[in-house]
Amino acid sequence: MTNSGSTPLPAEQQDGAFAHMAYVLRSNPVTLLAFCMFAVLMIAAVLGPSLVPYDPLASNAALALDPPSLAHWFGTDSLGRDVFSRVIVATRLDLAISIAAVALSFLIGSVLGSIAGYWGGWLDSILNRLFDTIMAFPLFVLAMGIVAALGNTVENIVYATAVINIPFYARLVRAEVNIRRDAGFAQAAKLAGNADIRVLALHIFPNALPPMMVQVSLNLGWAILNAAGLSFIGLGVRPPTAEWGIMVAEGANFIVSGEWWLALFPGFALMFAVFTFNLLGDGLRDIVDPRQRS
Amino acid sequence: MSLLSITDLKVSFQTRRGEVQAVRGVSLELKKGEILGVVGESGSGKSVTSYALMRLLESNGRITGGALTYDGMDLRSVKESTMRDLRGREISMVFQNPRAALNPIRKVGQQIEDVLRRHAKATRSTAKAEAIKALEAVRINDAEARYNAYPFELSGGMCQRIVIALALACDPRLLIADEPTTGLDITTQKAVMELIADLIAERGMSAMVITHDLGLAAQYCDRIVVMKDGGIVEEGAPGQMFAAPRHAYTRKLVDATPREGTCVRALLPAEQRTPEPDLPKSDTPLLEVRNLTKTYRGKSGPVHAVKGISFTVNKGESVGLVGESGCGKSTTSSILVRLSDPTEGEILFNGEDLALTPAAGFARDPRRAAIQMVFQDATDSFNPRHTARHSISEPLARLTNLSRLDLKARVEELADLVGLPRPLLERFPHQLSGGQKARVGIARAIAVDPQFLILDEPTAALDVSIQALVLNLLVDLRAKLGISYLFVSHDLHVVRLLCDHVIVMKDGEIVEQGPTSKVMETPAHPYTRQLLAAAPKPPVLATSAAE
C-alpha cells in the first residue's frame, strides 16, 4: 500500500534480526525441528568426548560383540569398544570434515562464480568449461582419485570433497551475479563511487546469499556422506579412529552373523546428520533474506 | 438492466500481521454496453475487486461479504467448474503486464487457439483460421505471420494487442481491463485504448477499465467510480467529476493529474500550495554534448542507439529529454552519467571533456560527485539488503571525508530535506512505499551536492498524488540547491511542468529542441505533434484557471 511520505508511522515497529528469526522458526515447525536436530549434532560434536561413558578407543575382549544393553546402549563391537561412545565421538570428525570442505568450496566457488558472472566474456567461457570438466567425472570416483593420488589423510578428504562441490557453488553464484550485474542498485553503487570489485563484493554478491544457503545446507549433507563413503571403501580416515563411514564398513561384515547394531547405529547417525542439513536449508534461506521481514 | 452488480463486497487477506481488509463494502452496477472506469491509487482495492469478481484471489484472500451478480447468476456460489466456463467466454480480462500474461514458450497464435478450443468456439480444423481472425480483429497487420511469433519477438504494444485478442476471442460480454496501458508508450497507449473502445462499441460489450490515470479514464469511460482504501468515494460522469468533484479525495486526484494550463504547485491540494520558488537561471553552459554517438554490435550488424546528438544544459536549468522506448534516451542518460562510454563525441562538463575518462574508471574520479542520477525503478535501484540509511550514506561514505557522526547527521538532514520521516531510515526497501522509495532515491542522489542531476522517469511508477508531491519536491530542491536537471520522461505534461527546455528524441536522433513553451505550443516536427496529440486530455478544470 502506498502512503504519502508525510503520513505518521504506524505504532508497530519493524522486526529486528532476532524477532525475524523467531518468526521464521515459529511459522515453520519443520525449520524449528531442523534447528533442534542441528543443536543436538553441535552438542555431540563439541561436548561429545567429555560426555560419553567409555573411551571410544579402549578395547575389552571380554565384552566383544555384546548386543545393546543398559551398560552399552548401542552394544559393543568386535574389539569390545562401546558403539555408543564411538558414534557420539565420531560426530566431531565427520562434521569438521564436511564443514571445512563446504566452506572451502563455498569460498572458491563464490570467487570464481562471481568473476565469471560479473565480467563475462572469455573469462566466463574458460571457467565454465573448467566446471563442466569437473562435473563430467563421476564425482565420487573423482574424489577417490584425488585422495588416492594425494595421500590418505583427513585434509585430503576435505580437499577432494571441496573440489567436487566447487562447480555447484560457482554456477549458482554465476547465475545470481549475472542477473544483478546491470541492476539499478549496482549502477547506483557505481555512482556512489564504488569501483567494480567493491560493487561486486559488497553489493551484488550478498544478494546471492539466500539461494546459496540452501545449497550450503544440502551440500553439508552430501559432504558427510562423501567423507563417510571414502572411509567406507578404505580411503581417508583410518581405523581405529571413530568415524561413521568406517564403523558402517566394519559393522557390515557382522550383519550376516546377526550383530546388526554395529552398522545400524552409525548408519542412523549418518542419516540423522544428512536429514538435519537437508531440512535446514529453507529455514536458513528465510533467515538471511531481509525481504522475508515485514 | 444491469449486466453486473456488485453489492457491498468485502474482501480480506490473511497476512503475517493479521487480517487486512482490502475491499470494504463496494457496490457498483455495470449496464450493458457501458464502459465503467474504476480509478484509484495503489492499495485502493480496485484490482482486488476485479479479481474477486473473477474468483481469482490469491490463496490468502477471501470474500467475506456481499453479493456478486452477473446476468442473474450469483458468482459467489456457483461451482468452480462453472466459473472456469465463464472466464474467457462471458467475462474476460486484460492484464497489466502483457508480456507476463502471455506464455513465453508458446506461439501467440497457439495461445489464442487454446482459449478457442477450451470454450468450444473452434475445432482442431478451424482453430487456426479462427485464431488468425482474432488477430485481425485487433488490427494486427500480417496476422498470418504474427500467428507464428513468440511473445519475446513482439513489442509491448503488440503483446497487449495479442492479450486483447485472447480476451476477446470467445466474444465475452464483459471485459475487465486492469491497467491495460501501464508501461506502454504514449502513442501506443492511445492506439490500445482506442482499439479497446472501438471493439467494445462494435460488439456491444460492457467493460470495466481499472486505472490509476484519471485523465485516461475521463477520456474513454462513460462513467467513473473513484476508490480509496477499499471503498467507493465518488461516482459520476467524467465531465462532472472534473468540473465539480464532490469528494475531497476526488478533488485531490483531479488537482494532481498533470494537464495543460496548470503549474506544478496547482497539482497539490489547495491548502498545501506554497508560492512558486524563484528558479535560478543563467546562460553559462554546464554541460555541452557534442555529436554524441553510441553504436552497439548487434546480432545482425551494428545497432545505432544514439546517432550524433548535440545539446547544451545551462547552469541551474532544467532540460526535458522526451521520447518513446527505444529512442535512445536511456542510452544517452547512461552515457552522460558516465556508466557507459560513447562510441564518439564529447561531453563537456564545465569545459572538461568527460568522455576522455573511461566509464570503468569514473567511479574514483574526483568529478564523480558532480553528476548523479535518480533511477526510474525505485525498487530495482536499491540494494534489498541495505536499509534506507545505508543507501543514502553510501555515496557520502565513498565520495566525501565525513566523520561517522557528521555522516549520520548529514543523512538525517537529507531525510528532512526530501520529507522522509527519520524513523523510516531504518527500513529495508521492501518495507517502504513507492513514494517513500522515490524520496530515498532523491536523497541519495543529492547527498554529495551534485551540480548535474539526471532524473530518469522518477515518477513513472508513482500514484498521481505522490507524483505531485515528488515533482514539487524536485522544484523546491532545484531552487534551494541550484542543481541542473536532465529530466528524462515520456510524459509531456510532466515535462511541461518541470522543464525550461525540451529535447525530443526519436530513433537515436534529436528531432526537435527548444524552449518548453515553444515546443509544446507550436511544435515544428510531426513527431512532436503526434506525441502531443497522444497524451490523454482530461477536461480542464474550470476553477483551476481562475485560481
Image: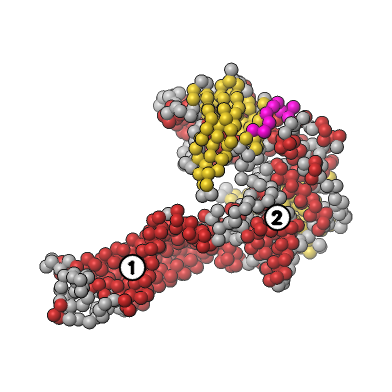
Q: Are marks 2 and 1 in contact (CB under 8 Å)?
A: no
Label 2 Cα neighbours within 10 Å, binned few <14 / some 14-19 / many ≥20: many
For the point 18% across and 74% down, the residue is: A77
Whether residue B400 is visible, yes or no, is: no
Residue A277 coordinates in the image, percent (x, y): 37, 62
Magenta highlight on residue B240? yes
Q: Taking A103 as reference, is B211 left or right?
A: right
Decide which of B246, A169 is in the foreground and name it.
B246
Quadrant where the C terminus of chain B lies?
top right
Decide which of A28, B53 is in the foreground and name it.
A28
For the point 33% across and 79% down, the residue is: A50
Decide which of B3, B156 is in the foreground and name it.
B3
User: What type is the residue that disc 1 sits on?
Assistant: Ile
Decide which of B280, A51 is in the foreground and name it.
A51
Q: Quadrant of residue B353?
A: bottom right
Instruction: Return the residue at label 2.
Output: B420
Magenta-highlighted residues = B232-241
Q: Taking B58 as reference, is A66 left or right?
A: left
Read off the chain for label 1. Answer: A
Residue B103 coordinates in the image, percent (x, y): 48, 39
